Amino acid sequence: MLRMLHTADVHLGARHTDLGERATVLRERQFAAFRASVELALAEDVDLFLIAGDLFDSNTQPRRSVERVAAELARLTRASIRTVIIPGTHDVYDGASIYRSYDLANMARSASDWVVVLTPYVPEIIFPALDIVVYGRVFDAKRSPRSPLAGLDAKSDTRASWKVGMVHGALLIPGKTDSDSVVFSEDEIARSGLDYLALGHWHSAMEGRAGGTAYAYSGAPEPVALDQDGAGQVLLVTLDDRDGHHEVTIEPRRVGETLTERIELDISTVKSQPDLIDALGRYADANLVLDVRLTGLYPDDLDLDIDEVERALAASFLRLRVRDTTIPAVPEGTPPPPDTVLGAFCQDIAERLAGLAASADPAAADEAAELREVERLGRHLLEGRQVTL
């Protein structure tokens, strides 16, 4: 039985220019998540530590940052845990690759087969003591000339019993990922003959099976962007031989601190800007990225400044975003022509409102208010806007 820790898309050194002064906080969180991944590998006494691309956010990093990574890899080596890394699309293996500039194995004071970077020129590594071969399907440019799995037939490889692949790219989803930099299909996974395919590139975790091959995206160990609510974890992968039958078990483990949450808030429940600030303030958490979408029909008497709301609550969250997707009030100005459906509708409402205004009936005021709401909804619908109530 073999055990592996699979991670990817750590994106160390990401600039996070959209976060302003909090960019440094998230960069440190990303390194903390990487360190937590190493701690987990040590605690679980795994055999292999796999990094499936984009360990670094770019090939331009200060030496100090690379030394911090090497120090963590050295901890793994001292515990007899081997590390295998492939470049991704951010730390691509081009002429300026960080893996050409720095010898991670040497910096970690490890033998070259304890910290291995797979490249187009070193496409695989065999570990006889573990009876495993690891294939890294990598290119020397960000955009691949072909599928990274093209021609891979691990089943016919007799050098080891266990076959593990590493790819940084997009699983083909017609109409969605066809034009990505590196693309491969589920059929190619099924034909690969691999026991397990460790994937990177998607920051949200996902796993599946194609033919006899289990595959998974570990996701980013710490979210890199607002919409990555499937990030924050690594995968513990167990390879077990039971009476000649290879079994693969995948277990997600959380290592990231950052939480992400999306909520929808009906604008009809908001009475004022302080009321909205108070409602969102109940979610306050320094580790939370909160994405709020305001929905519904915007009340005539409500006055909100979304920028002010975000500024007022900025200190309460790691990040807060409020999006106004409400339906606006009926526009003022010249009424539509009376010979159109919309014009006839508005004219009818106006005549009925005039009649209610002249009425002495005590219920006329309530009826007029309801009628004005009917006018507003009707105008939005007749003008082609979808109204969610």
Image (cartoon, rainbow, N blue to C red):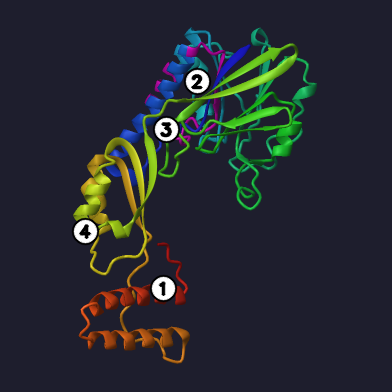
**Residue that mark 4 sits on:** 272
Sequence-wise, the earlier of marks 4 and 3 is 3
Tell me whether circle 4 and circle 1 mark residues in contact (CB < 8 Å).
Answer: no
Q: Amino acid at mark 2?
A: Leu
The CA span between labels 1 and 2 is 61 Å
Is residue 139 positioned above or below 330 on the image?
Answer: above
User: Three-letter amino acid code at disc 4?
Assistant: Ser
CB contact under 8 Å: marks 2 and 4: no
Disc 1 target residue: 380
Look at the picture and state if 320 lies above or below 375.
above
Three-letter amino acid code at the position of disc 3:
Glu
- Which segment did they paint magenta? 44-72
Give the number of the disc on residue 222: 3
Which element carries disc 2, helix, strand or loop?
helix
- Left or right side of 315 for 1: right
In the rendered view of the protein, which quadrant contains the N terminus?
top right
Which type of secondary structure does the marked residue at label 3 adopt? loop
Q: Position of residue 271 (x, y in %)?
A: 23, 59
Q: Given contact means CB atoms under 8 Å apart, are the residues at marks 4 and 3 in contact? A: no
Separation of disc 4 and disc 1 at Cα?
24 Å
Would residue 168 appear left or right of 151 to someone viewing this image? left
Whichever of labels 4 and 1 marks the residue nearer the N terminus, that label is 4
Residue named by callout 2: 104
Does 152 appear above or below 348? above
| Foreground residue among 157 and 235 | 235
Within 10 Å of the Cα at label 3, are there few (<14), some (14-19), or many (20+) other Cα atoms? Answer: many
Few, some or many residues within 10 Å of mark 1 (<14, 14–19, 20+): some
Residue at (44% x, 44% y) in the render: 227
Looking at the image, which residue is at 23% across and 86% down? 359
Vertical arrangement, residue 363 with respect to residue 263, above or below: below
Q: Nearer the viewer, mark 1 or mark 2?
A: 1
